[in-house]
Image (spheres, rainbow, N blue to C red):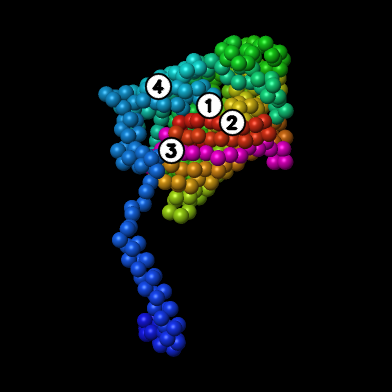
Amino acid sequence: MLGMTMLGLILMMSPQEQSDELSRADVLQQAREEKAQNLQKPTRSALERGLQEFRDRRLMERFQEGFKGFHPMIGGLRSGSGFGGGTYVEEKGIRVSAQVSMKGYQKYEFRYKAPLPGKLLFADFRSTYRNFSQEHYFGEGPDSRKEDRSNYRFEDTDYVGRFGITPAKHVRAGVSGGWLKTNVGQGTDALSPSIEKRFEAAQTPGLVNQPSYLQAGAFVEADYRAVPGNPRSGGLYSASWTSFDDRKLGQFGFDRFDMEAQQYIPFFNQRRVIALRAKTTLTQTTTGQEVPFFMQPTLGGSEDLRGYREYRFRDRNMMVFNAEYRFEAFSGLDLAAFADAGNVAGRARDLKFSQLKTSYGVGFRFNTAKSVFLRADLGFSSEGKRLFIKFGHAF
């Protein structure tokens, strides 16, 4: 029908118009034929080809599988610890791991998962020793100054047992109990003074004498993320309460409440994702008790407020909000734009939305189908810009 219409229009034209129209048709047909004869395959950049081959060969998965029972651990030690790694061995519910970093950070851990019958109940035990040689401290409160940066050594030994139920596939709830021993010493960072040279003991509760705690708590978690290591849909919701009873000094007892919500909204066949997180930590003490400075919640660094240094702000209470727009550039690489907002305060009621500190930036996520193995975030804030290169997702 379309051809008959075109023919009718041509017959209605003058001879000269018919000739011009036929000439244009011939030119278009010739161009189509030449294009068909010179078709070329779409070209890909060297980075795209390399990442595709990396995924196709499952190099990261094979690396993580380890050798003769030893599994490598890259990063994941602690934000600000510098490049580090280690290994773990796991068999029959027992896992033993060791990690060290170039800044002298150390972490050694033993885990045991009890083989309970069925899927309703679970029980596990964890023993952890940590030695962090140069933790940052800028002072307490939202008005602390970046010029007051100092550092300290933090050491602790933690024994925790948990028992709980799994009432639904993605839901867990239970109780916990244990013992925590803490210690603080001189920092080893040559770029800033050790904490005792910049702050008085009255400004830093727990600096001179450190407590040992009897712990007790309860928790609940609902994890609906489809792929926890590289989430593109679902959500994670958790809440916990922990009581720290100072059995050594009787001065630093407190309760801590932790709440977090994550939600992932996919579109365009999960090639685009909006990732959202809200998180808060609140502490409460009785009369005459204090929260040690090294156990106060913090903000700043690669995990939350990415335009600031690690642990830039700390106080007895904290809240933070994060939003990311992640989109797949090509297989193995996601690009991201993010915004962060949060603050700390001595009292929970002083955490006000009108006083949030903010940062924003862009990032790269190199990934496999199940995990993000390398992340780079460039964040901007009122204190300048910060570049973080980390192993694993921010959230």
Q: Amino acid at mark 2?
A: Arg
Q: Residues within 10 Å of mark 3 (few under 14, many from 20)?
A: some
Give how far apart the Cα atoms at labels 2 and 3 are.
Answer: 19 Å
Confirm whether the magenta stretch covers residue 314: no
Q: Earlier in the sequence, mark 4 or mark 2?
A: 4
Name the residue nearer the viewer: 138 or 29.
29
Name the image quarter holding the N terminus.
Answer: bottom left
Taking the spot 27% from the left edge, 24% from the top edge, the residue there is: 68
Give how far apart the Cα atoms at labels 4 and 2 are.
Answer: 26 Å
Give how far apart the Cα atoms at labels 1 and 3 are.
Answer: 19 Å
| Location of residue 30 in the rendering, given as x and y in whole percent from the top left corner | 35, 68
Taking the spot 36% from the left edge, 23% from the top edge, the residue there is: 88
> Which residue is disc 3 drawn over?
366
Give how far apart the Cα atoms at labels 3 and 4 are.
Answer: 21 Å
> Which residue is disc 2 drawn over?
386
Q: Earlier in the sequence, mark 2 or mark 3?
A: 3
Observer able to see residue 278: no
Q: Are marks 4 and 2 in contact (CB under 8 Å)?
A: no
Q: Amino acid at mark 4?
A: Gly
> Which residue is disc 1 drawn over?
79
Q: Give the vertical position of 7 relative to 291 (above or below).
A: below
